Image: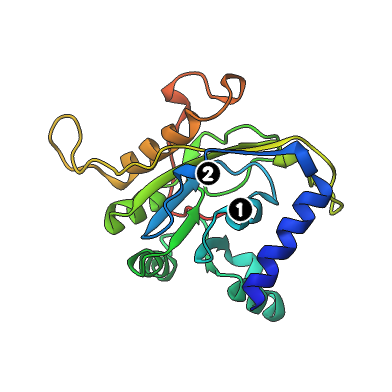
Amino acid sequence: MIYSVFRLGVRILAWVILGRRMRIVGMEHMPREGAVLVVGNHVGTVEPALTGVFIPRRDVFYMAKSELFRNPWLGWLFRQNHAFPVERHTADRAALRAALDVLAGGHVLLVYPEGTRSWDGHLIGEVQAGAGFIARRSGALIVPVASWGSERVIPRGSWIPRRADVELRIGDPFQLPALRGDGRPLSSREAAAIMMERVIALLPKERRPVGADMLTIGGSSPAA
């Protein structure tokens, strides 16, 4: 019940605040059943909620930074809305197990391979190996989602939403190859980079990094 109210509330707020300035393209690519790992770039505070509530499924789960769960009441509220904590920049085995359990149950998991959000709307340029580990171990279908504009809805240092042009662009589902081009097994780091490259390909040209060398591989936490 709480999750249903949350979804409806966020949708209503999006319609009231953003209206026609929010554009969603490609939602028909989102599978309506089965395990799905949704990966995207993270450029705004409101982005995970906006992405999750417009996915036409009620079994969307989120990895969220552990700091959000320190307050017991807020932690309870986040859990009721399908979020679970992850310690960023660590190999948080409990979070990775929870993520794999979500996908093993045939649900949708939303993660951000960059590990944190960008405040200026541009890619951070570093991907976390944990997102690749989840993809490799689960074997789930992967759906890339690129977004831009949401960083202007609640800018850094502000709590008041503002009207802005926001776009979510959903790409074709894909699965990771088991092997690299040279026949060796794909590593979690390489898997994370492949997923992020699919996201980058959906971005407008002016928001893409210049060349593949802009992607670097970081630690193991894929949470926002």
Q: Is residue 127 visible?
A: yes
Going by the numbered disc 1, the residue's amino acid type is Phe
* Mark 1 or 2, nearer chain start: 2
Going by the numbered disc 2, the residue's amino acid type is Met
- Residue at position x 55%, y 41% in the image: 41
- Residue picked out by circle 2: 27
> Tag 1's secondary structure?
helix
- Residue at position x 46%, y 55% in the image: 221
Q: How many marks?
A: 2
Q: Position of residue 29 (x, y in %)?
A: 45, 43
Q: CA distance from mark 1 to mark 2?
A: 9 Å
Is there a contact, CB below 8 Å, between mark 1 and mark 2? yes
Q: Residues within 10 Å of mark 1 (few under 14, many from 20)?
A: some
Q: Position of residue 207 (x, y in %)?
A: 60, 25
Q: Is residue 134 above or below residue 126?
A: below
Q: Is residue 24 above or below residue 60?
A: above
- Residue at position x 85%, y 44% in the image: 162
- Residue picked out by circle 1: 54
Between 145 and 206, which is closer to the camera in this rendering?
145
Residue sticking out furthest to the left: 183
Q: Residues within 10 Å of mark 2 (few under 14, many from 20)?
A: some
Between 42 and 141, which is closer to the camera in this rendering?
141
